[in-house]
Amino acid sequence: MIANYHTHTPRCKHAVGPERAYVERALSEGFQELGFSDHSPYFFDVPGYYSTFRMGPEQLPDYVQTLLALREEYRYRIRLRIGLETEYYPRLFPRLLDYLRQFPLDYLILGQHALFNETEGIYSTHPTDDEKLLDQYRGQTLEALESGLFSCFAHPDLFRFTGDPKAYCRHVRTICRRARELGIPLEFNLLGFQEQKHYPDPEFWRIAGEEGCRVILGCDAHSPEDTWNPALIARAEALLSGFGIRPIETLSLRPIR
Ligand SMILES: [Zn+2]
Ligand SMILES: [Zn+2]
């Protein structure tokens, strides 16, 4: 592993450690490229609603400035990329994009933490056996990928479906096939793997292997110490190799301008 594109900062309110510590850690692991993709701001249209796991819109300028300065400082040692992890909330996305386009962002990764949007849907990690919701996850994430604005699909197996396994396979296969056609890599999430969450889901990755998807490992680092460990990476590679998947090492970034 020589690059990681999934790195947070304390602005999202559930990550710790200064940006510099993440950069130093990446250097000590021999990484050549480090992408920050903290939880993006969003503009909600429900009065009084405040999302608790992302930076506020007013924090984005400082995020970008801090990373630009570090990029300059470390330019001979590591390539730093400035991105965001964002959900695709159809009704709210255009306004967000207008705002994001004012900043020199190198990329977006899709992390679909809620269906519809946070104020009117359910969280993707909430267990459900309702196939209609799985279908919504499929439709919503594919619409996002088809926009051409996302460089990678982070933890694509975040949706926690407890219903009919055949239905799960069917929908996952559609997601994987379309991602492959669009040339968008799927992220195997090392944080979920380390913490033994419900993702990465082996069934998902089996299908991704059958569909010939491009796959990249992502640390999803919420602290400089997180998930950058060679033993974990080796275990992830072994699991994926069982499904015929050899992860790619770097992303081709799609700027949003
Ligand atoms: Zn997070
Ligand atoms: Zn993340």
Image (cartoon, helix red, strand yellow):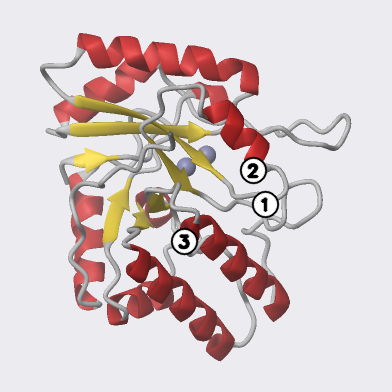
Front: mark 2 or 3:
2
Q: Is residue 99 above or below residue 212?
A: above
Q: Residues within 10 Å of mark 2 (few under 14, many from 20)?
A: some
Quarter of the figure with residue 253: top left
User: How far across and down, in percent of the image, does residue 71 sit?
Assistant: 26, 16
User: How far across and down, in percent of the image, does residue 103 sit?
Assistant: 47, 22
Question: Is the residue under label 3 in contact with that under label 2 (CB below 8 Å)?
Answer: no
* Residue linked to disc 1: 90
Q: Earlier in the sequence, mark 2 or mark 3?
A: 2
**Three-letter code for the amino acid on which mark 2 is drawn:** Phe
Q: Residues within 10 Å of mark 1 (few under 14, many from 20)?
A: few
Front residue of 87/54: it is 87
Q: Earlier in the sequence, mark 3 or mark 1?
A: 1
Quarter of the figure with residue 57: top right
Front residue of 146/251: it is 146
User: How far across and down, in percent of the image, does residue 69 sit?
Assistant: 32, 9
Q: Is residue 88 above or below residue 157?
A: above
- Rounded to the nearest angstrom, the CA distance separating label 3 from label 1 is 18 Å
* Residue linked to disc 3: 156
**Three-letter code for the amino acid on which mark 1 is drawn:** Pro
Q: At 20% from the left edge and 33% from the top edge, which residue is drawn?
A: 33
* Residue linked to disc 2: 93
Callout 2 secondary element: helix
Q: At 57% from the left edge and 53% from the top edge, which residue is drawn?
A: 112
Callout 3 secondary element: loop
Callout 1 secondary element: loop
Visible residue check, residue 5: yes
- Rounded to the nearest angstrom, the CA distance separating label 2 from label 3 is 19 Å
